[in-house]
Image: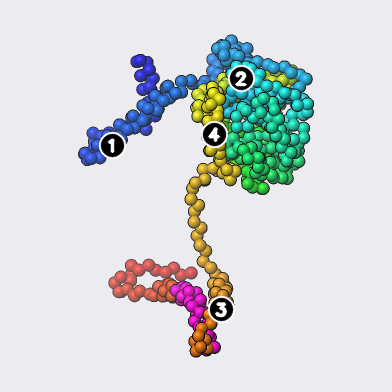
Amino acid sequence: MEEISEEIDIKVKKYLRGEGANLEVLQDKKLKGQLAVREELYGKSAKAAAKAEKWLMPSEGGYLEAEGIEKTWRIRQEAISREVDISSSRNQFDITLPDLGPYTMDFTSSGRYMTFGGRKGHLGIVDMKNMDLIKEIQVRETVRDVVFLHNELFFAAAQKNYPYIYNRDGTELHCLKEHGAVLRLQFLKNHFLLASINKSGQLHYQDVTMGQMVGNHRTGLGRTDVMRVNPFNGVVALGHSLGTVSMWKPTSSAPLLKVLCHRGPISALAFHPNGHLMATAGKEKKIKIWDLRKLDYELQNIPGHANTLDFSQKGLLACGTRSSVQILGDLSGAQNYSRYMNHSMVKGYQIGKVVFRPYEDVLAIGHSMGWSSILIPGSGEPNFDSWVANPFETSKQRREKEVRSLLDKLPPETIMLDPTKIGTVRPAKKKEKPTKQEREAEMEAAIEDAKDIDFKRKTKGRNKPSKRVKKMQETVAKAKRPFLEQNMEEEELLARKKQKTSEVVELPVSLQRFAKKKTLT
């Protein structure tokens, strides 16, 4: 118990708001009492936060640590598997299916389920916790990409001519013919939108709850198969052959932002989980890290080539090319990425996609001969929030979560570069003073409107032409009055200003030497 109390005391210091105020110096008893109560509240909140961290966040993340002149990127997977526990060593495997590759895959937000798709038509879902194959089907046509929808019960596959939606049992539910021959798929889980880019460079957004096509935009930048979603704001980013990255939202037919990132075609793209960093890879063998808060600010330029990129939950960056994977890490916290780990596949394997598994220190690699799983210490978030993603959720919890997420579904209009602006008050625009010509035009329009008024015909003697003319003149004068009053006010104000500037105050002779002298120009 003493060890636990000491550990909590250490954590309390982390949550305290600096050193406490010195109350002995204060003379005011009322202020002294108020500050004493506040300091007590701060202490209680820090202790509660420390206890929550101790009991609700029991696991701690860690990275590989090298001793002496040893380098972390020289540590092999065989050496890591000898040191980890049995459950972690089970996550290290190779699935060889040479006749159906290359493979692509996707994980659910909890990391428990994985869907895979082979280029030759092989589709399936795997329970990664129990290592059980739930379902596999053969669609007998090209499969370019797969993605889970809001949970593991539904997934979409980009096939030869159209994307299809399947359920967990492998039953075909929908054929989305409006999307065309799709190259890449992405799912926006907060908005329930399925985004796709096809061979013609058309970007589609489809609401999977209502089946409605929310957006259909022609990018005008040619064919591309580089597409990712920013998890922070839901903006879709596309990498193009001219080295530009364009960012889109469903309610705008023009890109929100276009950034020239590379001098050659862009081969891969990835977003940090916090949404503030973007990594791009170009054919000129450069990997660049960008700060999206400063739009086109380049943080780092790393030599190297990558066909696929992916960020882990803790910020590690996986770069896959040919038959090797390189892991870059920002271990110092200064947004300076350096080499952390290396892994080489069998010579001849062509890596197509790398994906980090959520809440696990695991990297899945899809390649031409199947798919593999390797251990990357420190890549996954060690503690999960069951309200966000629960790897152990029951069917009842899944149903309740689905209902909650549908109630919390965000409309497409909330997708923007800076979502913090939502809910703020738009600043009032300053009214510009109308010019003299504009005031005259407004007065003439008001006079014309007054002349067009039809007066009600009255009884005998009150409807004479002279009285009608007099009434018309009164109406016109009433319409002109506000403009004339405004002109008079402005003229009076101008006259006062001229009078102030023209007035010369005569001072007594004895004080004239203190007056400010005007400089001659």
Q: What type is the residue that disc 1 sits on? A: Leu
Q: Residues within 10 Å of mark 2 (few under 14, many from 20)?
A: some
**To which residue does mark 4 refer?**
403
Q: Name the one closer to the observer, 191 or 433.
A: 191
Going from N to C along the chain, the mark reached first, 1 or 2, is 1
**Front-most of residues 222 and 68:** 222
Residue identified by numbered label 3: 454
Cα–Cα gap, marks 1 and 3: 74 Å
Read off the magenta span.
Answer: 465-491
Upstream in sequence: badge 3 or badge 4: 4
Label 4: element kind: helix
Q: Amino acid at mark 4?
A: Val
- Percent x, y for residue 73? 61, 19
| Residue identified by numbered label 2 | 128
Q: How busy is the neighbourhood of tag 4: few (under 14 within 10 Å), some, or many (20 plus)?
A: few
Q: Which residue in the structure is indicated by mark 1?
A: 35
**Secondary-structure class at tag 2:** loop
Which mark is nearer the camera, 2 or 4? 4
Image quadrant where residue 172 sits: top right
Give the mark, 3 or 2, whose residue is nearer the N terminus: 2
Residue type for callout 3:
Asp
Distance from the alpha carbon under mark 4 to that under mark 1: 45 Å
| N-terminal-most mark, 1 or 3 | 1
Please tell me whether residue 63 is drawn above or below residue 442 in the rendered image: above
Q: CA distance from mark 3 to mark 2?
A: 82 Å
Mark 1 or 2: the one toward you: 2
Mark toward the start of the polypeptide (4 vs 1) = 1
